[in-house]
Amino acid sequence: SKEYTIAYVAGNMASAYFYAGPTETKAYIESLGAKCLVSDADADLATQVNQIENFITQKVDAIIINVVDPPSGVSEALQKAADAGIPVVAVDSALADDFHNYLAFVGSDNYALGFSCGVNAANYLMEQKGEVAGTCCVFDGVEGNAVAQLIYDGFWDGVASVQADHKLEEVSHLYGGAWTEEAGLQMAEDMLVANEYIDIMFAISDPFLIGALTACERAGRDEMYMCGRDGDKAALKAIKDGTNIKFIAGQDPVGMGMISADLVLSYLENGTVPENRI
């Protein structure tokens, strides 16, 4: 009934995967006759808060947000949006547990994604060694991230589902801060110096794997079975090309964005509230 303006507040568009979500969602929204404004916080909390407040000032009709860590840092700004009558949908990363003034959260079953990585890593070790044994390193983003914790817990439960009394030992758990290839490269360089041999490299997010693969190839280290979660095209190509990246648990940033767009537009046009908030 009108040309709505939807703001997509992206957390970080530095990698192809995180770029795809907001850009394709913008195209989808505009194909429906609405406007979409996209901002990139570049993984900086203060920047994201400012962007939210700017969109409120611009009187956008709705906000879709991929939250920067920690999610509690944007609660006050999002409350201002709620007070202004602007519906909010969180995508990929959930909002703070004590913040309830939002329309919906659209995300993946991150525990299941991590679980599938664990199962495949464990099956590989069974094929190679006859048991789930060896060393494992984990590349993570920000300590305390709730989504990352679900993926991590799922991974180890997936390993245990193959062999309950497994002997796969976590010898390194590194945090890259930003979810980028550069962070993966740096973590891998540190990990390779500290460990002479690694059986499994598990990354919470694909961009880490791409950076890590570069570091491993430079160092001539090809012993690792590398796996991760997201579905970055570069990581999928690396599997196809026969590199050490062997398995990816894929999610769908474009699909999540499109569902978020449908939810806010249905709410604006018809007052429709989702049956399930999550």
Image (cartoon, rainbow, N blue to C red):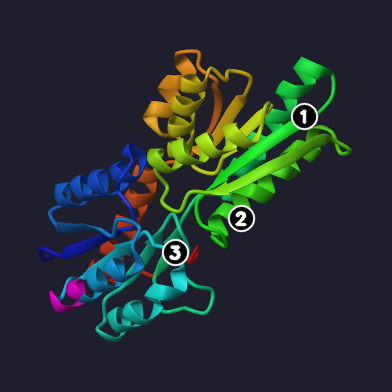
Amino acid identity at mark 1? Gly
Does 133 sit left or right of 53 as displayed? right
Question: CA gap, disc 3 to disc 2?
Answer: 13 Å
**Tag shown at residue 134:** 1
Could you tell me how far apart the alpha carbons at marks 1 and 2 are, in whole angstroms?
A: 22 Å
N-terminal-most mark, 3 or 2: 3
Query: In the figure, residue 87 lies in which quadrant?
Result: bottom left
Q: Which residues are magenta?
A: 54-58
Q: Magenta: predominant secondary structure element?
A: helix
* Residue 230: % across, % down: 47, 39
**Are discs 3 and 2 less than 8 Å apart at CB?**
no
Q: Which type of secondary structure does the marked residue at label 1 adopt?
A: strand
Given residues 229 and 274, the one toward you in this image is 229
Q: Position of residue 90 (x, y in %)?
A: 39, 63
Q: Is residue 43 above or below residue 118?
A: below
The quarter of the picture where the N terminus appears is bottom left
Residue 116, image x, y percentages: 64, 36
Q: Amino acid at mark 2?
A: Gln
